[in-house]
Image (spheres, coloured by chain):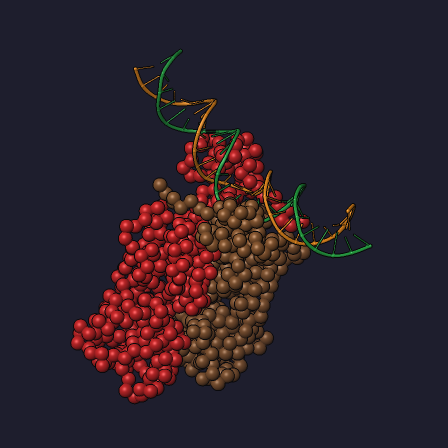
Chain colours: A brown, B red, C orange, D green
Amino acid sequence: MKRKTTRVTSYDVAKLAGVSQPTVSRAFTPDASIAKDKRDRVLAAAKQLHYLPNSIAASLSRARSNIVAVIVGDMHNPFYSESLQAFINRLQATNRQVLAFTVEDGRDCDAVLMQALRYHVDGIVVTSANLSSDLISLSQEVGIPIALFNRSTSDPALTSVRCDSVQGGGLLAHAMFAAGAHSYLIVRGDPQGSTSRLRVKGFRDALAALGIGDGSITEIDGGSSYAGSYRAISNHFASLSPNFPDAVFAVNDIMAIGCADALRAKFNIDIPGDIMLAGFDGIREGRLGPYHLTTVRQPIEDMVTKTLELLGREDNGEKPAAQINCVLPGIFIPGRTVPGLEEIAPEKALEADIESISGKN
Amino acid sequence: MKRKTTRVTSYDVAKLAGVSQPTVSRAFTPDASIAKDKRDRVLAAAKQLHYLPNSIAASLSRARSNIVAVIVGDMHNPFYSESLQAFINRLQATNRQVLAFTVEDGRDCDAVLMQALRYHVDGIVVTSANLSSDLISLSQEVGIPIALFNRSTSDPALTSVRCDSVQGGGLLAHAMFAAGAHSYLIVRGDPQGSTSRLRVKGFRDALAALGIGDGSITEIDGGSSYAGSYRAISNHFASLSPNFPDAVFAVNDIMAIGCADALRAKFNIDIPGDIMLAGFDGIREGRLGPYHLTTVRQPIEDMVTKTLELLGREDNGEKPAAQINCVLPGIFIPGRTVPGLEEIAPEKALEADIESISGKN
DNA sequence: CGCTTGTTTGAATACGCATTCATATAGTTC
DNA sequence: GAACTATATGAATGCGTATTCAAACAAGCG
């Protein structure tokens, strides 16, 4: 006796409106060839019967689901929940749906990717997760395009969109150097991912060009998380005390925040008075009062735009001749964790920060 | 010449394995009645052909999609992105997918809800959004259950799960009173939603019972956001100066954080030395070093469990006799924004906070 | 008026799987 | 070995839509 609500189908509507089923279908298709009066009759009948076109059936029939899968890796990093949010908003605006997946840290995203493939989604966005080449070729086989978001890849079968980590790292190095830093500490992230590596590279290369030798730069492993960085920098500074570096570069904002909290709580360090600090990503949390992180913002909106454009292009069968690795420049955001950078009046900057944290409410 | 990848179907696999199509279907169904050797043959053939069962087709055939829609209202409040994350994790673990939607602040979620209904999802979770009664009855008509998350409702057609705002508000009132507060400021949230109203009620009722009269309590409107609260409390305090209240209760954590930032930046107020502060929700941001908010945590995991249980129950046709409004108690989290509450050793509390911010990385 | 062009329409069918039902096979019991 | 029972299998069908395709019709033109 389950689900006695016998579904209303397009046939029911057709009967009531005195037309055929295909006509009902056409009535709900924007550019279909159908007489205005018929469409009106159909829509009226549909409303009367509470008819809702079944998108599942439509997907099957059209061999196109209007669904995009978004696989998010590190949901503990606000950058990725901001990204997910951006994807949802954008896709929703173009009448597509988001099938959302998460992958536990370190777990392979293969199982999850498989799920997405089964739904014959129009495309798959993979964020901060490592996928096996088996799955990549499977997706090729099935004909579902995959795009990496904020990850680069050497696999020619994959499209990727990311922010220019090298350039961004360089911007921060220049800022800290200009502010007078002599000795540097780099707090690395996930050694697996390309992102951390490239940011560090950009940072170090720029310092090298400025004449800062390797002897003035130390690297420690912050595990890509708040807690990891908090602990890593605590341990490191404890062993160093009181010979601290002038500047700390954490490869992302959430780690920089962890560093800030640790330095203040455990070593009573003033930022930027005693030590300057920079992050990367431009997450909203970095704009909170106690931080005002100097950072490089990833242009999320543009990256989302580009990602969806590339996915759509592939989906239309336009196989790119060469691999597409779209790299967008990062945007330097002067904060208060590196001295001498207030380009806008402090009060203005504060206002902007406040707005950026919670939209236009 | 689009999409020349002619899909591999169960028929192709059947042919290769030398069985019928239903046998292929059974091979992929866990508890189906099928001989082991056949299943192996089928699975081998499937692998060889890169066959992936088409979940869309299965949904259509089974009249059950294994998809749950989650509609999130205020994505700028981390509580909701944490909730979304919890839903994704939980559903994924039970082999179901999440179709994620967002609703702009203030916009009606009707259009979005309609989309969800069209996909014939198994259930819809609505978070922090207001839906019209038209849509509610439509969902009834179509037979798709809806559950409200962190929202209560008087509509008997709806199921809801939320945290006990009244009890939680009371807990905070007691804590602040015990810490010696005499005059109170309440920063309200969205006047539309029940959540803010009930938290304020719980807070005020408890204070009244403790002998604090209305004359000692002021309310201002914080607009439910960081920026709104920041500005509201700034304006209010500017007009008050220097006669400030002893205690500020913001109806949610993100607002409390906004208050903390404003009080510190604009009035150089020490928390809790000069003024104590409390929030509500238990978001991760509240555990960051500069805040350590005293708050009431919503038991998200339990709430998610309960929500899905209720959705599933309805989906199986078990129409509840009466409306179900599940209310779970909030958990008092002693922080450092109300004095005298460190029940655990400070260092332990700090460790716990650090972990809670970024999982077990 | 005959012809062509263009627009609507409905009959038929495909999409890919799950399920029902009837049949066939293997296994059990007396 | 007959009479059952349990288990496996395949033929046929349904899920609800979109899309052919051909027929019907209206309009435009010489």
What residue is shown at x 21% (from left), y 71% (from top)?
B206
Determine whether B48 is above or below A295 in the image.
above
Tell me: A129 left or right of A258.
right
The image quadrant where one finds the C terminus of chain A is bottom left
Does residue B247 show up?
yes
Q: Where is residue B164 in the image (x, y as percent from the top left)?
A: 27, 63
What residue is shown at x 60% (from left), y 59% (from top)?
A310
Q: How many marks?
A: 0
Q: Where is residue B76 in the image (x, y as percent from the top left)?
A: 42, 68
Q: Which of A81 and A103 is in front in this view?
A: A81
Q: Position of residue A337 (x, y in %)?
A: 45, 78
Q: Position of residue A321 (x, y in %)?
A: 67, 56
Q: Nearer the viewer, residue B163 or B119?
A: B119
Residue A271's image quarter? bottom left
Q: Nearer the viewer, residue A259 or B222?
A: B222
Determine whether B31 is above or below A263 in the image.
above
What residue is shown at x 51% (from left), y 83% (from top)?
A343
The image quadrant where one finds the N terminus of chain A is top left
Residue extending furthest toward the bottom: B242
Tell me: A162 left or right of A269.
right
Tell me: B150 left or right of A125.
left
Determine whether B199 is above or below B120 in the image.
below
Determine whether B112 is above or below C13 in the image.
below
Residue B69's image quarter? bottom left
Does residue A199 show up?
no
What residue is shown at x 59% (from left), y 46% (from top)?
A141
